[in-house]
Image (cartoon, helix red, strand yellow):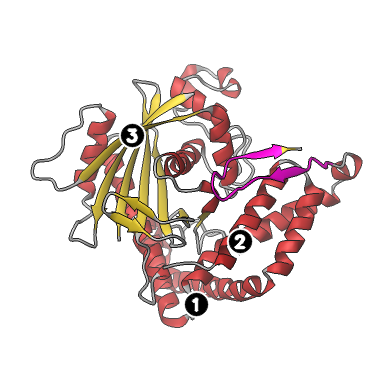
């Protein structure tokens, strides 16, 4: 059983808020360093929470993803946080062991870090926000259609809540579409976090534009960033809840 | 932006199939896939056409940008090349294609069905499947709420 600390930041674009990746990456980095301080005059609303996850749950969320059929992601997770190399890497001399390894027993696609990010995203929306991971699907209009890896600019997921949801001042009616983008960072530094957040925001924007051509837009978009806390042998989850 | 009950039920049926495939009950998953194809045939037909259209736009745009930019410029700025394709594809979809947001949401479902169908058919045909038929039947409990509980009978 692992504890996942999460920090959620609420931003209402509808009420004049803006997505500032520099500010957000700084908050994420401070959260990782356990020295969370808000920038002066910040109007951001932050919520801390903690949830538990075990190996079997990680496997379960990984299965639910469907597109990335990765076996034993719970086991890979434990290798990642405990700095233990999996058996197939133990025979190699330390000088050539990679910091991150690619999956050998994947079925479709994906690397370990990305899948950990996606499984933690699903755990977060279910355990913290009360949404159902079963009502979540991958959302990629392009990728996979032609198999061209250049066309990856959509949000990862969409979730349809089965009941009305209220998060602070954000109200999400039942059966509406919540967009989600999950990222993971194995060796985080401030610049890397900022780059990932920017990319995630761009993906959310693209998906939102294509979905809302007739005026109806998603009320909520979620960007999650699973950050490996190397020192404490854990993962932390930084989430941005965007009212769009 | 709300979705219909029908799309929701489509998603749930697909989830069930995915879990049955994970349980290696290929015969049941084949049957479930066939049922989904019959039940949601209209959506599948409509969305497949939309998927084809987006596919052809994507190919046209890639070809055009490749010719415009030339190999050297693409090599120098690979990210810029990708971004240019994304922008143009998105613009052309908005200008030229008629669709509803639900059609767009159903595209990934169609993609899943095709890949699952292919996988299940291969497993059904394989020698391994013939020699050791797997019938681990699953009983589904309310998947929509918790999404994480099922029991093997």
Q: Nearer the viewer, residue B91 or A155?
A: A155
Residue drawn at x 50%, y 24% is A78
Seen from the viewer's position, the closer of residues A220 and B150 is B150
Q: Which residue is mark 3?
A: A49
| Label 2 secondary element | helix
Measured along the vertical axis of the image, is residue A217 above or below residue B14?
Answer: below
Q: Position of residue A102 (x, y in %)?
A: 53, 35
Calculate the distance from the C-alpha at mark 2 to the C-alpha at mark 1.
20 Å
> Both on one chain, marks 2 and 1?
yes
Vertical relation: A14 (above or below) B59: above
Looking at the image, residue B134 sits to the left or right of residue A163; the answer is right
Write the residue at 17% across / 60% down: A16
Q: Residues within 10 Å of mark 1 (few under 14, many from 20)?
A: some
Look at 51% across and 31% down and name the residue there.
Answer: A101
Residue B145 picture location, percent across and down: 54, 48
Residue A5's tag is: none
Q: Which residue is mark 2?
A: B9
Q: Are marks 3 and 2 on the same chain?
A: no
Q: Secondary structure under badge 1?
A: loop
Horizontal and vertical percent for residue B44?
64, 70
Q: Secondary structure at mark 3?
A: strand
Mark 1 = which residue? B99
For the residue pair B150 and A147, the one nearer the viewer reads as B150
- Look at the image and give the residue range highlighted in magenta: B134-151
- Does residue B59 appear in the picture of this structure? yes
Query: Which part of the image, by quadrant, shows the C terminus of chain A?
Result: bottom left
Q: Is residue A29 above or below residue B99?
A: above
């Amino acid at each position: 059983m692992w504890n996942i600390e999460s920090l959620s930041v609420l931003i209402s674009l509808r009420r004049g808020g803006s997505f500032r990746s520099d500010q957000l990456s700084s908050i994420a980095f401070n959260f990782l360093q356990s020295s969370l301080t808000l920038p002066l005059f910040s109007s951001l609303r932050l919520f801390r929470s903690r949830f538990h996850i075990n190996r079997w749950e990680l496997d379960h969320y990984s299965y639910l993803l469907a597109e990335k059929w990765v076996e034993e992601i719970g086991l890979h997770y434990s290798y990642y946080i405990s700095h233990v190399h999996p058996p197939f890497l133990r025979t190699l001399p330390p000088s050539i062991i990679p910091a991150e390894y690619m999956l050998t027993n994947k079925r479709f696609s994906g690397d370990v870090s990305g899948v950990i990010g996606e499984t933690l995203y699903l755990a977060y929306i279910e355990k913290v926000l009360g949404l159902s991971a079963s009502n979540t699907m991958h959302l990629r209009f392009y990728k996979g259609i032609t198999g061209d890896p250049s066309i990856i600019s959509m949000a990862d997921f969409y979730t349809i809540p089965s009941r009305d949801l209220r998060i602070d001042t954000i109200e999400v009616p039942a059966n509406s579409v919540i967009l989600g983008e999950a990222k993971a960072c194995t060796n985080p530094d401030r610049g890397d976090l900022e780059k990932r957040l920017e990319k995630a925001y761009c993906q959310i924007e693209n998906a939102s534009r294509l979905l809302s051509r007739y005026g109806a837009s998603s009320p909520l978009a979620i960007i999650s960033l699973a950050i490996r806390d190397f020192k404490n042998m854990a993962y932390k989850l930084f989430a941005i809840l965007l009212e769009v | 932006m709300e979705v219909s009950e029908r799309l929701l039920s489509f998603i749930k049926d697909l989830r069930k199939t995915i879990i049955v495939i994970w349980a290696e009950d290929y015969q049941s998953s084949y049957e479930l896939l066939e049922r989904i194809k019959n039940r949601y045939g209209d959506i599948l037909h409509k969305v497949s056409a939309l998927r084809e259209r987006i596919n052809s736009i994507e190919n046209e745009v890639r070809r055009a940008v490749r010719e415009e930019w030339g190999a050297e410029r693409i090599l120098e700025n690979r990210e810029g090349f990708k971004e240019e394709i994304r922008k143009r594809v998105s613009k052309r979809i908005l200008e030229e294609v008629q669709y509803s947001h639900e059609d767009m949401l159903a595209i990934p479902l169609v993609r899943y069905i095709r890949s699952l169908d292919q996988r299940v058919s291969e497993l059904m045909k394989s020698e391994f499947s013939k020699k050791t038929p797997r019938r681990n039947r699953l009983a589904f409990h309310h998947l929509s709420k918790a999404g994480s509980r099922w029991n093997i009978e």
